[in-house]
Image: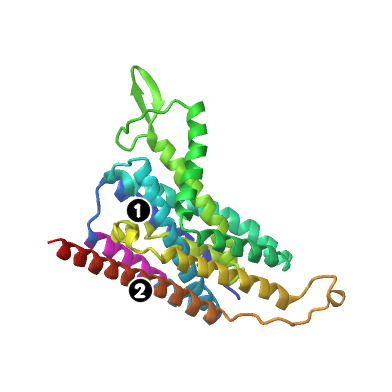
């Protein structure tokens, strides 16, 4: 696909300015966003992504627009899973709710930097050597199995805590926050605040999710610009989504199974894609023979949406059933 360079540069500049403006608002007025405010911001970023897809349709054609929408939908679904670990981290480090917006925004910026690096490296590898999709596929299937375990999110948080405990041994960190400052003065000495530890934890979380998500979107397209912008739009608004969903995250008990299914499906898709390309030297002398099905990207979009909808509906039904049971028990006790 042919995407004009002027469009790529203009898009990245505009989106960077939007992110910087969002960050400036947080730094100027740290607060706990209301449900209405969060909903408006999430709607704005979703609408912006759809508008971008529409512009991309006229500038670069239907294939580019389609791949962006499917890649964005997949990355958005996988990014929602970040929120569960973010909740655990915010709770474990007792981050004041007033400053959680700033922490999440810094985490998103770290995620964008890490994903940009992964996209360039893995994208180049995928373009140069198609059999690498076998490795991507196996890794995503492994990730899906790990994700489906009941305490997967808690295990990730515990792993981070171990590393952070080691970090504390080499750095003088206070036990109390000083607003959103990274450094503070205690007993006449400058020391780090727990905010630094939180930033490191968020960055490590983003690193783990980048390792999972970048190979996944490469199953949709290897175009670097589309891969990066899909990740960018998926992360934009994630902070507001965190506050919008709030306590509802605890009720989405089956959502991680939906995410695991998506990862497993994409893993299988990548392996089939590698088999479809069939460029292994030991198969028929390396001659290209299409002997395996290549799953259509529209099918991928259907699987992604169906997985998220089914896991969400099942979670809400299970919660409603548990609520009725508790109400029945309370009535019986009376």
Taking the magenta stretch, the answer to whether it contains residue 39 is yes
Name the quadrant of the N terminus. Answer: bottom right
Q: Secondary structure at mark 1?
A: helix
Q: How is the image coloured?
A: rainbow
Query: Mark 2 — residue?
Result: 313
Q: Position of residue 160 (x, y in %)?
A: 49, 43
**Residue reaching furthest to the top:** 188
Residue 61 appears in the rendering? no
Query: Mark 1 — residue?
Result: 21
Taking the magenta stretch, the answer to whether it contains residue 115 is no
In this orientation, which residue lies closer to the viewer: 48 or 161? Answer: 161
Q: Is residue 208 left or right of residue 175?
A: right
Q: Position of residue 188 (x, y in %)?
A: 35, 17
Q: Are marks 1 and 2 in contact (CB under 8 Å)?
A: no
Q: Position of residue 165 (x, y in %)?
A: 48, 34
Q: Is residue 248 above or below residue 276?
A: above
Q: Secondary structure at mark 2?
A: helix
Using the numbered discs, state the Cα–Cα distance from disc 1 to disc 2 in whole angstroms: 36 Å
- Quick one: label 1 or label 2, which is nearer the N terminus? 1
- The magenta-colored residue range is 36-49
Please rate how many residues cluster around mark 2, counting C-alpha atoms within 10 Å: few if below 14, some from 14 to 19, many from 20. some
């Amino acid at each position: 696909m042919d995407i004009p360079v002027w469009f790529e540069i203009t898009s990245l500049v505009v989106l960077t300015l939007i992110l910087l403006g969002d960050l400036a608002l947080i730094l100027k007025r740290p607060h706990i966003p209301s449900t209405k405010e969060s909903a408006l911001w999430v709607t704005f970023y979703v609408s912006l992504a759809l508008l971008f897809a529409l512009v991309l349709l006229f500038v670069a054609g239907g294939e580019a627009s389609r791949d962006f929408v499917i890649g964005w939908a997949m990355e958005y679904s996988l990014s929602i899973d970040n929120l569960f670990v973010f909740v655990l981290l915010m709770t474990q480090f007792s981050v004041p709710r007033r400053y959680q917006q700033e922490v999440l925004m810094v985490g998103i910026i770290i995620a964008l930097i890490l994903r940009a690096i992964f996209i360039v490296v893995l994208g180049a590898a995928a373009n140069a050597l198609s059999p690498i999709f076998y490795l991507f596929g196996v890794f995503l299937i492994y990730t899906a199995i790990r994700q489906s375990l009941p305490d997967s999110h808690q295990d990730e948080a515990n792993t981070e805590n171990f590393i952070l405990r080691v970090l504390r041994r080499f750095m003088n960190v206070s036990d109390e926050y000083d607003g959103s400052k990274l450094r503070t003065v205690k007993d006449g000495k400058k020391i780090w605040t727990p905010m630094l530890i939180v930033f490191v934890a968020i960055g490590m979380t983003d690193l783990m999710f980048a390792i999972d998500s970048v190979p996944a979107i490469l199953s949709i397209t290897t175009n670097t610009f589309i891969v990066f912008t899909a990740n960018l739009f998926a992360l934009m608004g994630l902070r507001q989504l965190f506050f919008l969903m709030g306590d509802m995250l605890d009720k989405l008990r089956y959502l991680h199974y939906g995410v695991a299914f998506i990862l497993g499906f994409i893993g299988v898709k990548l392996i089939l894609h590698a088999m479809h390309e069939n460029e292994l030297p030991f198969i028929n002398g390396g001659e290209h023979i299409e002997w395996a099905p290549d799953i259509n990207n529209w099918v991928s979009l259907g699987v992604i949406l169906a997985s998220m909808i089914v896991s969400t509906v099942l979670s809400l039904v299970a919660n409603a059933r548990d609520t009725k049971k508790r109400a029945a028990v309370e009535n019986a006790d009376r």
